[in-house]
Image (cartoon, coloured by chain):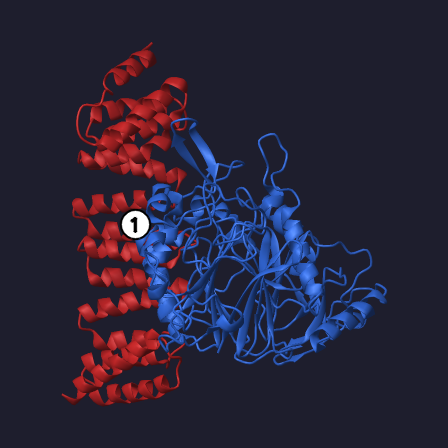
Chain colours: A red, B blue
Amino acid sequence: MIRIAIFLLVILSTIPTHGHPREESKLVILNQQIEEHPEQQDLYIKRGAVFSHLGKYKQALADFTFAKTLGNSNLVMFELGVMQYQQQQFSKSMLSFDSYLKLFPNHVPSLEYKARIYRDLGDYSAALEGFSNFLKLNPYNNPGHYLRVAELIIQMDLGINAALQIIDQGINNLGKIPQLQNFAIELELKQKQFDRAIERHKTLAPAEHPKWQLRMAELLMAAGSKEQAKTYITSAKHKLNSSKKTPANLQLVMQSDLLESELDN
Amino acid sequence: MTKKTLSVFISVIIFSLTIGGCANINQQSTGEQIQYNQIGITKNAEKPERLFLQQLSSNSVIVKWRGAGEQACITKSAMDLKTQAHCIQATNSDSNHKEAHFTHLPAETNYNYSIGGFSDPEMVLHTAPIVGQQPEDENVHIWIIGDSGTATYQRSDGTFHHAGKAQAVMNGFLQYNASNGNEPLDLMLLLGDNAYENGTDDEWQVAFFNLYTDLISQTVVWPTIGNHEMGGANIMGPIHGLKLYAGASTSNDPDSYISTANQTPHRIPYLDIFSLPAKAELGGVPSGTEQYYSFNYSNVHIISLDSQLSTRDDIQRRAMREWLIADLSANTQDWTIVIFHHPPYTKGSHDSDVNPASYYGFDLPIVHIRWEFTSIFEDYGVDLVYSGHSHAYERSFYLNGHRSDADTFEATKHAELNADGTPAIGYGDESYSQISTGSKLDDKVVYTVAGSSGYVSLGKGKLDHPAHIIQKHDSEQRHGLAELGSVVLDVGSKKLKARFINEKGQVLDTVIINR
């Protein structure tokens, strides 16, 4: 009886009124589907999420509550956690994401939200630890995982060194790959740690091709080592003479000329 | 007959005269010297259910299998398998595979090998030429197939769509090959969708390992991820409601793979099946992920990009782009080939124009590749790009700078031109030169869609993308061929030649690039 009542209440409140046409058209489809398949849990989860996006939290909560009765209740928890976060119910939100992570330990959005909650509560070390643990526990991280976490850390103002720590974790696991090392170099340069940037650049293999050499020259110039920079520029120009005539190499020739004239000035 | 073909032929003859012996385990392998002191054949040994070669280089190879057998042995002749062999105990890898990684091998050398004491005439391998050098036969012979996985493509009533078509394509290639010197393959490149409909391990077994058994036991395989490798996705639709559609995943996470058989998210089977070089084991720049990688073979640099997963997330796409630039910057090989599943230019069963491609979110990679990667290919001297996904054959002019929809293509701006101002078609007098005669730079690429190795389908497509050449063998003179087929690529020092071969072994299209 309670189920039917909740069901009717939700149906009555789903008449679209204003704004969000795409979300509202989703509601129309979902309403129809729920009519045809009233026992299907994921339909209520999806509709609850739409209500949540529209700010209709009572209806969303009704759907999430009902969905919990139709299957594994933890499946509801991510969308519920998102809604609770939007309502700044941080403790409840945290518990919801933890429940969802029991089912899907690698669910990055849940970990991101948890990090946001820690940050919003001022517990920055907990935020970082959560990310770090996720990356350590996941055996199949790709470069993008580490970059995403590092960028989030920067966005959340948790510190460049914290971001570098994550990148170095990635380098330890995946190798000295350009996707991570170049990002780390940019972070080192932001902190004017030129020597560290240069050491990182040296680890990128294979070394000594013109692009690598010119980048080294730029870093050395930033560090004030003009003579060393000049050596790399000269070597790069020499190699470019016999390299393939591609637009990229042409660009490198122009770059080498520019760097040379900067040095001369 | 080339030296390599003759060696293989003799090995097969000798093998067929041998009788099984007894296994003797007393293995030694010291540094550069390989010592042969085991016996590689056992009477009544079982054939592995799955056997293929990975990461073959001039001095190493991974023999990978599933099934009986805990060690692999190699020798320079089949007779030696009976008397002496170099054997390695297998290491276990994902999904019950086993791997034996042989190293310190000499370049361009034929080997017979056994698994768990089992061997047959097809179990031969030929190590690669030294990187940067021409092979002894002066040709790198490559077979390329796209969307071939139809042996497992079932209707809801249990009958099979497209039964026998992938087999027919292979037969066509073998017939063509036999009539043209019967040169053994050096490489086999897969363009994705090689196991319908969900890329499950079982589907890979039937649609790939059972079909190409002989070829892949002696030719190294290099794959790329297609949309059907990534299983399916539950999609809400107005007619069918919530339904799992195979090949419709828009996730960037390889651990979110689901299929009709198992809707609990788990790791994409493709990454468990293949052992791919994430650490530049065969040259190139390390990528840190098996989702995209590169390697060198002889004088060719080959890159496999991940258009299915990595392009669907801004950060991962940017990371892949960054790696690609680093890899191409460091590349010094004569020729560069890139493979990935989603074609940047197509009007076959998929449409590369922005609106249809992005409306159906699962085709968004097509647009991202065109907007963000084609300029890199053209700036960094890539020669050929191969994709599948659209189930037809389309082959472009020698292109540069075409980033928007099909109706913005202008041959005078975007293609290599003949002296009379018409776009060059890539063969005969209009063969291409690696250094473009127009720009005097190596800045143009031939883009080929080769997604008809398992079936042909155009859907609403009309094969009318103007960036592709009009195919003279098409009865309707369209910009493509609605024909089953595959691509054979021959790469020499000064010339590469790519041919589209139909299921009858006929050559329907050719493109030549000279350097």
Q: Position of residue B229 (x, y in %)?
A: 50, 48
Regarding residue A205, the answer to whether it shows in the image is no
- Report whether A215 appears left or right of B153: left
Q: Quadrant of residue A220?
A: bottom left
Q: Nearer the viewer, residue B211 or A245?
A: A245
Q: Is residue B23 placed above or below B408 in the rendered structure?
A: below
Q: Please name the residue that numbered disc 1 is placed on.
A: A130
> Quadrant location of residue A243?
bottom left
Name the residue type under label 1.
Answer: Gly
In the picture, measured across the screen, residue A198 lies left or right of residue B59, that is left
Q: Furthest-left residue in view?
A: A265
Q: Position of residue B485 (x, y in %)?
A: 59, 54
**Vertical arrangement, residue A238 with respect to residue B88, above or below:** below
Give the quarter of the image for residue A199: bottom left
Of all residues, the one furthest to the top in this rendering is A1
Above or below B379: residue B237: above
| Total marks in image | 1
Q: Answer left or right for A27 relative to B276.
A: left
- Which chain does tag 1 point to? A
* Residue at 59%, 45% in the rendered image: B150
Q: Quadrant of the N terminus of chain B?
A: bottom right
Q: SS for tag 1?
A: helix
Q: Residue at x 71, y 64 (%)?
A: B178
Q: Residues within 10 Å of mark 1 (few under 14, many from 20)?
A: some
Q: Position of residue B141 (x, y in %)?
A: 61, 69
Q: Residue at x 23, y 66 (%)?
A: A187
Tell me where residue B289 appears, x and y as whole percent: 43, 60
Which of A96 and B451 lies nearest the eye of the viewer? B451
Q: Is residue B289 visible in the rendered structure shown here?
A: yes
As drawn, the residue found furthest toward the front would be B420
Determine whether, in the image, residue A244 is placed left or right of residue B490: left
